[in-house]
Amino acid sequence: MLENEVLKTIEKYNMIQKGDKIVIGVSGGPDSITLLNLLNNFREKLNINIYVAHINHMIRKEADEETEYVRDFCAGINVEFFCKKINVEEEAKKLKIGTEEAGRNIRYEFFEEIAKKNGANKIATAHNSNDNAETVLMNILRGSSISGLKGIEAVRDNKYIRPLIESSRDEIEEYCKTEKLEPRYDKTNKENIYTRNKIRNLLIPYIQKEFNPNIIEGINRLSNIATEEERFLNDIVKNEYRRINITVNAKETVRCENKGEIKAVLDLKEFNKLDSVIKSRLILYTISNIYGKTSGIEKIHIDDIIKLCNNNIGNKYLTPKKEIKIYVKKGKIFFLSNSSFRRE
């Protein structure tokens, strides 16, 4: 049964502890309605409080009806419902980003808002094993590193949880029928406009037919292996960061003022002794520590930084993106916030 499977997943990844307050992202589709119904059934067993956050993207004419469906469902099981209505397509145009990216950003911002409002410490989304396989394939097509092969993490930052991540779409559909949940279906999921839809509706069925009917399971095994190896490498990188991280003195801070504020400093000699794989990850780890993200930092930037460190000729610096400046001087690698960016 799906209930037992999901309980095992929750236990396996230590997703939920007694007393947790969980915001559940619910669109009204089969996955999210299943997640809501399951966590509602687990409320007493797991001793949790749950809240529902729903975004009306205003993209399809059915959106308002879906909102009412989720609202009524929550009322029927006595779960607090929070809704935000926003025109995602207009927001995407305004920000000059894709509709999918805009929708995702808006959803997660709203989830965070509702979590803060209710003192919730967890946010649950309804990603399943099919979603994970699709994500891995998307990352492969984009030329991802090993990190991309991890796919969707079961638990991220000890806050975002995916209790359905080891359950298949077929199991979820069957659960909806058995429980008579009557979820709402997004017709655009059948339209092969977006990359994910093409992978879901065209690529995976083709691979299943012509190569491997169990491709979903195979990709998820690959994802699990990549996750374990990534964890191992991350531990090595964290240890190396602690080992070669340098505390700067006041004089160095003054000397760097015209180039930007010092955020981190690494020992250049020790850095250059490291394997190139660890060097690359250490650069990304350091930038992530400073800014909380590494978006915009590509392989070409990493290669340039490593080359700069290897050459170590004079006072050289690189600006891989406008917020960050990498500066090499007197046996040290300075990670600076770009002073010109700060003045803007």
Image (spheres, rainbow, N blue to C red):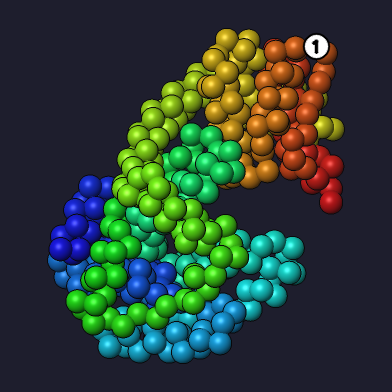
Type of amino acid under label 1 = Ile
Out of 259 and 301, give the one closest to the viewer: 301
Depth order, front residue of 60/273? 60
The percent coordinates of residue 165 (x first, y second) are: 33, 55
Image vertical order of residue 246 relative to residue 20, above or below? above
Q: Residue 31: give x, y in percent of width and height.
A: 35, 68
How many numbered marks, from 0 up?
Answer: 1
Outermost residue, front side: 210
Locate residue 43: give its quadrant: bottom left
Residue pointed to by mark 1: 313
In this orientation, which residue lies closer to the viewer: 326 or 300? Answer: 300
Q: For residue 32, what is the image quadrant?
A: bottom left
Residue at 81 percent across and 45 percent down: it is 341
Regarding residue 316, the answer to whether it shows in the image is yes
What residue appears at the point 78 percent right and 39 percent down from the top-left corner? 338
Relative depth, front residue between 259 and 291:
291
Residue 285 as seen in the image, left or right of residue 166: right
Instruction: Say whether residue 121 is visible.
Output: no
Residue, x 19% and y 68% (percent of image)? Answer: 42
Give the left or right position of residue 84, taking residue 71 as reference: right
Quadrant of the rendering where the N terminus is positioned:
bottom left
Residue 190 image offset from top left, x and y in percent: 49, 70
Residue 303 as seen in the image, left or right of residue 107:
right
